[in-house]
Image: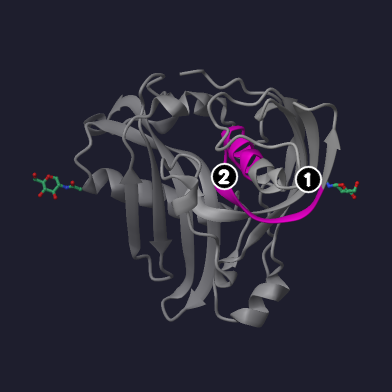
Amino acid sequence: MRALIVLSLLIQVLSIPPPPHVDPHPVTCDEKGVQEASQAAEKQIAVYHHHGYKYRLTNTASSKLQKKDDTECEFHLELVLEETDCHVVNPKPLEECQLRQMHETKVVSNCNVTLTIVNGKTFAIKYSCHSEPASAEELVKVCPDCPSLLSLTDPKGLESIKEAMKKFHAETNETNYWKMLEVGRISTQYMFQGQSYFAQFAIVETTCLRQDNPEESKCKMLGKEERFGFCTSTLLGDGEITVDCDLYEAQVLYCTLHFIVPNGNLPNKVLPEST
Ligand SMILES: *[C@@H]1O[C@H](CO)[C@@H](O)[C@H](O)[C@H]1NC(C)=O
Ligand SMILES: *[C@@H]1O[C@H](CO)[C@@H](O)[C@H](O)[C@H]1NC(C)=O
């Protein structure tokens, strides 16, 4: 019985000014600039990507350079990016995030990118990406016994997250109540203990107090300097639950995360706050 796999499949077409301060190196308007341009595109796409996991550049499949004059040019790039294990709320630098292994179901994103360079800096970026997880058939080939991905809205999976949050609140010393922000992945596997569910999800600190045992829907994000976290949980078929959450320090950078629509699409346009 193979469950339907639903991940965020399509990042919308964006044509936007580049976010400030993210060009890694000056991009030269010649063939040597392709690598810098690809890396600049990777960083800029990351800034506009506000849900799910961070993506890393793994290949520049093709590149075309169009020179306008000595200081201005356009790169047309076909880039391959792959999902990492860092959720966007994780402050870890992209270079330190690990690409998904085959047995974790890789997600590959093919992107068409146009980067306009003026005086070595990105002046505009336009991109469209299509992301797709490896198929269940591919997974079975490398690992017949590995957990298979479920839809992000799978009822049993969501129930396991609810249980995990209960356990988190029972065990933590946090003053405030935290709530689930976004489901990252849900997978399932039949084990010795029965059908078991594995979840990864982002959480956020709210204005409610944990000791009040509040109703989650009434708890709002702090709105300013709230902290985010990322949890992994396991609900075994025999009912045993484990949860492990990393809570991150408040980051000014993540103001833009207020644009997150849980399980929704990337917003059309997000203006990062300049620092
Ligand atoms: C990228 O461009 C190619 C060729 O024009 C097209 O076939 C493909 O659908 C495009 N992909 C995306 C994600 O826009
Ligand atoms: C909560 O506080 C107690 C007592 O200070 C400590 O032993 C325990 O490890 C803390 N738990 C967590 C999850 O930080």
| Magenta region, residue range | 39-63
- Give the percent coordinates (x, y) of residue 157: 52, 56
Do the residues bearing badges 2 and 1 touch, measured as CB atoms within 8 Å?
no
Is disc 1 surrounded by few (<14), some (14 to 19) or many (20+) residues within 10 Å? many
Q: Residue at x 41, y 55 (%)?
A: 232
Q: Calculate the distance from the C-alpha at mark 2 to the C-alpha at mark 1.
A: 24 Å
- Residue kind at label 1, given as amino acid type: Leu
- Residue kind at label 2, given as amino acid type: Gly
Answer whether residue 65 is magenta in the image.
no
Q: Foreground: 102 or 58?
A: 58
Q: Residue at x 34, y 55 (%)?
A: 243
Q: Nearer the viewer, mark 2 or mark 1?
A: 1
- The residue at the far front in this view is 70
Q: Is residue 174 left or right of residue 3?
A: left
Q: Is residue 171 left or right of residue 244?
A: left
- Give the percent coordinates (x, y) of residue 252: 40, 24
Secondary element under disc 1, as helix, strand or loop, is strand
Q: Foreground: 48 or 205?
A: 48
Q: Residue at x 59, y 31 (%)?
A: 261
Q: Residue at x 68, y 41 (%)?
A: 37
Earlier sequence position, callout 2 versus callout 1: 2
Residue of label 2: 52
Is disc 2 surrounded by few (<14), some (14 to 19) or many (20+) residues within 10 Å? many
